Image: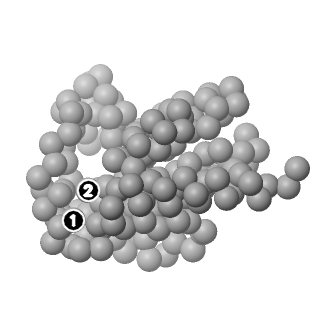
């Protein structure tokens, strides 16, 4: 199964991705550390490193899927093209694709989280609140099925809902 976590920066998707990866013993591939590694390797920030990071994560995910492993992808996935990338990958390896979108329904709390976060990603430049707000509109055009979780809900409840969603998709698969 390919599990694609989606949501605006600072919404809480990485925390959920990490917990799902731990509980399900599934590798978590995050786009942000890959982009930071591209910068550390000397690729100029003016280059399309965000796109390149998605392509690198896709290549690693394909390798894992080819071995029969499930994968969690942790990325904003606000663009139709990004979501199409995961759909194509799932079709190519004939695996189920499940989207989980993480939101933070309180803009003030979301902004505080974003502006206060300090992740251990060397050289990564955190997005501004204004850039996050500009990306919000892209989610309005999302029509594919997905589970939407609010990070203001208790983390244990969100993890349980995500696992139930993933289990339901596996248990309803035709044999």
Q: Report whether 122 appears left or right of 26.
A: left
Farthest residue to the top: give it: 41
What residue is drawn where x is 56% and y is 48%? 3
Q: Which residue is at the front of the view, 70 or 19?
A: 19
For label 1, count other residues whose C-alpha is less than 10 Å away and answer few (under 14), some (14-19) or many (20+): many
Q: Is residue 34 above or below residue 15?
A: above
Report x, y in % for residue 154.
33, 61
- Rendered image quadrant of residue 157: bottom left
What residue is drawn where x is 61% and y is 29%? 64
Report x, y in % for residue 140.
44, 77
Residue identifier under label 1: 110
For label 2, count other residues whose C-alpha is less than 10 Å away and answer few (under 14), some (14-19) or many (20+): many
What residue is drawn where x is 23% and y is 74%? 106
Q: Report whether 154 appears left or right of 90.
A: left
Q: Report whether 119 appears left or right of 80.
A: left
Q: Secondary structure at mark 2?
A: loop
Q: Quadrant of the N terminus?
A: top right
- How many marks are shown on the rendered structure? 2
Q: Secondary structure at mark 1?
A: helix
Report x, y in % for residue 92.
73, 43
What residue is drawn where x is 61% and y is 37%? 70
Q: Is residue 107 above or below residue 171?
A: below
- The answer to whether one can see residue 160 in this image is yes
- Tell whether label 1 touches label 2 (CB within 8 Å): yes
Report x, y in % for residue 160.
48, 56
The Cα–Cα distance between marks 2 and 1, rounded to whole angstroms, is 6 Å
Q: Report whether 3 appears left or right of 94.
A: left
Q: Earlier in the sequence, mark 2 or mark 1?
A: 2
Residue identifier under label 2: 10
- The answer to whether one can see residue 81 in this image is no
């Amino acid at each position: 199964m390919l599990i694609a976590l989606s949501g605006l920066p600072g919404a809480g998707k990485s925390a959920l991705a990490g917990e799902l990866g731990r509980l399900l013993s599934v590798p978590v591939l995050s786009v942000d550390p890959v982009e930071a590694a591209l910068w550390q390797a000397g690729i100029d920030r003016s280059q399309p490193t965000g796109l390149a990071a998605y392509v690198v994560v896709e290549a690693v995910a394909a390798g894992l899927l080819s071995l029969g492993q499930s994968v969690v992808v942790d990325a904003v996935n606000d663009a139709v093209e990004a979501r199409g990338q995961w759909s194509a990958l799932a079709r190519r390896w004939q695996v189920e694709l499940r989207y989980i979108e993480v939101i933070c329904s309180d803009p003030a709390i979301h902004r505080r989280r974003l502006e206060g976060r300090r992740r251990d990603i060397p050289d990564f430049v955190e997005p501004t609140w204004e850039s996050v707000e500009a990306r919000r509109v892209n989610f309005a055009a999302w029509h594919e099925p997905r589970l939407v979780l609010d990070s203001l809900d208790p983390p244990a409840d969100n993890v349980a809902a995500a696992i139930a969603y993933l289990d339901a998709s596996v248990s309803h698969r035709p044999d």
